[in-house]
Image (cartoon, rainbow, N blue to C red):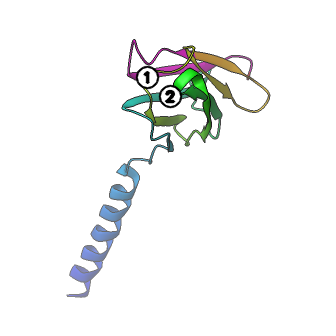
């Protein structure tokens, strides 16, 4: 009886460990609440290793003559992923320029929401 309980306990612990390792890591996201568009980023080093906490920022001018402005920032998770949601499909003076800035490096990604409302970018940072 004790042997059976021990085996069951170890099986449950093993199953819990496997389940925990299979849980997807949540992707950090920021919501502009301005429209239907979404941009997904994956940021990695040239060695194809994901970059954790790479800051991605964008300044949005919207509304009549672009008088309304908003700045959004988000950092990547341990898989190098981040997401911007609720972006407008029309902006004043496109494209939107996203600046990817992991410690000491910088790269700009231009995004035209009127062309591709649901975009995905893989950004490879050189020099790390």
Q: CA distance from mark 1 to mark 2?
A: 6 Å
Q: Residue at x 50, y 28 (%)?
A: 41
Q: Which residue is mark 1?
A: 120
Foreground of the two, 16 or 113: 113
Q: Identify the mark at residue 49; answer none if there is no mark.
A: none
Which is more N-terminal, label 2 or label 1? Answer: 2
Q: Are marks 1 and 2 in contact (CB under 8 Å)?
A: yes
Q: Is residue 46 visible?
A: no
Drawn side of residue 37 relative to residue 84, left or right = left
Drawn side of residue 59 relative to residue 4, left or right = right
User: Does residue 38 show up magenta in the picture?
Assistant: no
- How many labels were placed on the picture? 2
Q: Is residue 98 visible?
A: yes
Q: Which residue is mark 2?
A: 41
Displayed quadrant of residue 43? top right
Instruction: Answer few, some or many: residues within 10 Å of disc 2's Cα (few below 14, many 20 plus, some between 14 and 19).
Output: many
Relative image position of residue 67 (x, y in whole percent): 61, 28
Instruction: Answer few, some or many: residues within 10 Å of disc 1's Cα (few below 14, many 20 plus, some between 14 and 19).
Output: some
Residue segment shown in magenta? 110-127
State whether residue 117 is above or below residue 102: above
User: Does residue 117 show up magenta in the picture?
Assistant: yes
Which residue in the rendered view is the most extreme toward the bottom?
1
């Amino acid at each position: 009886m004790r042997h059976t309980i021990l085996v069951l306990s170890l099986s449950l612990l093993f199953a819990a460990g496997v389940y925990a390792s299979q849980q997807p890591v949540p992707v950090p996201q920021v919501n502009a609440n301005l429209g239907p568009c979404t941009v997904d980023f994956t940021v990695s080093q040239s060695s194809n290793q994901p970059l954790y906490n790479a800051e991605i920022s964008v300044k949005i001018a919207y509304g009549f003559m672009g008088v309304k402005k908003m700045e959004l920032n988000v950092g990547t998770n341990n898989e190098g992923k981040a997401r911007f949601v609720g972006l407008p499909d029309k902006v004043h003076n496109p494209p939107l320029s996203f600046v990817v800035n992991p410690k000491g490096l910088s790269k700009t990604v231009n995004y035209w929401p009127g062309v591709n409302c649901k975009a995905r970018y893989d950004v490879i940072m050189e020099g790390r």
